[in-house]
Image: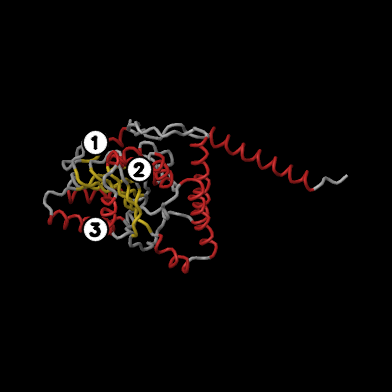
Amino acid sequence: MQPCLCEVIQLFAALAALLVVLIIIIAHVTAKKMPNLHRSEEEKYFISDNGAKEQFPSIHDTPTKDLTVVVPSYNEETRLPVMMAEALEFLQKRQKAQPSYSYEFIIVDDGSKDKTTEVALDYSKRYGCDKVRVLTLTKNRGKGGAVRMGVLVSRGKTILMADADGATKFQDIENVEKELNRLKPWPDNMAISCGSRAHLEQESIAKRSMFRTFLMHGFHFLVWFLCVRGVRDTQCGFKLFTREAALRTFSALHVDRWAFDVELLYIAQCLKIPVAEVAVNWTEIEGSKLVPFWSWLQMGRDLLFIRLRYLSRAWTIDTTGKLN
């Protein structure tokens, strides 16, 4: 006797429910409960002007700079100099106009296989370790892990994460800063201002293949559906944090790779930290580390797991974590 349509639908519904339960269990069981804040002994030090090792400070300390720029770098020996030249020129002009203004760069070499550390150390030698410090990770953590390690040893009252490729014009920091200040008064001195490429979306669609456009829209939908609403472009690598917002979000961050921005903003929304989004100039630079299909697939999986791990309480937002 042939099964009726109703029985087939019930069977598929039961299998779908079983699959959902299985995915939730996998997400929960495979979750690392605490953010990876561990450092090797070498990662606790930077090279000072006299060539000696000096211990990095902590974001828990009182800030001594107006701005910290954290630059995650993986195999960036070629692109890093272009970004640094533009950023240093801009900040030197600002300091000349405002002598009391102070800043620092923390270039985080995320386990590169090229001469990224050597290139970065050259800037530290030229400008002094008070302005440029190099944090070399002993193994690759992923962009999120690299940014977190840099943020948690920052000295700035505000902290900017900026990609090493220089795709965003550094002078756009002025617009990002204005948007951050517009959020005042900051609750508990916490606010985040995100650079955004959403205004360039139509132009980029015209240059992309239909498949890449489909992946992009699918990713945006998953971000909106699962994690973050109210921010159109979560992935732009140009974000400015008050020191307190950086401390609260990055010390609770679990995701180390491409989807870390989404978890970061999810944490911010859970903590009711005000978030602004502002258009920035952006140019695609050759040499991207993102492999379209596999990177999007990994990010899609991470988005689903972010949501499920917080829902199942495998992850909780603990903002008291300290580097060790």
At label 1, which amino acid type do we have?
Pro
Tell me the quarter of the picture where residue 80 sits: bottom left
Badge 3, how many Cα within 10 Å: few under 14, some, many 20+? Answer: few
Name the element at disc 3.
Answer: helix
Mark in the foreground, 1 or 2: 2
Name the element at disc 1.
Answer: loop
Q: Are marks 2 and 3 in contact (CB under 8 Å)?
A: no
**Image check: 134 left or right of 38?**
left
Q: Which of the pair 95/245 is nearer the observer?
A: 245
- Could you say where residue 22 lies in the image, as x and y percent from the top left? 62, 37
**Image check: 211 left or right of 168?**
right
Q: CA distance from mark 1 to mark 2?
A: 25 Å
Find residue 273 and name its label: 2
Q: CA distance from mark 2 to mark 3?
A: 33 Å
At label 3, which amino acid type do we have?
Ala
Q: Which of the pair 182/124 is nearer the observer?
A: 182
Badge 2, how many Cα within 10 Å: few under 14, some, many 20+? Answer: many
List the residue tagged with mark 3.
85
Q: Write the residue at 32% across / 58% down.
A: 166
Find residue 57 and name its label: 1
User: Which tag, 2 or 3, sits closer to the chain's start?
Assistant: 3
Q: CA distance from mark 1 to mark 3?
A: 26 Å
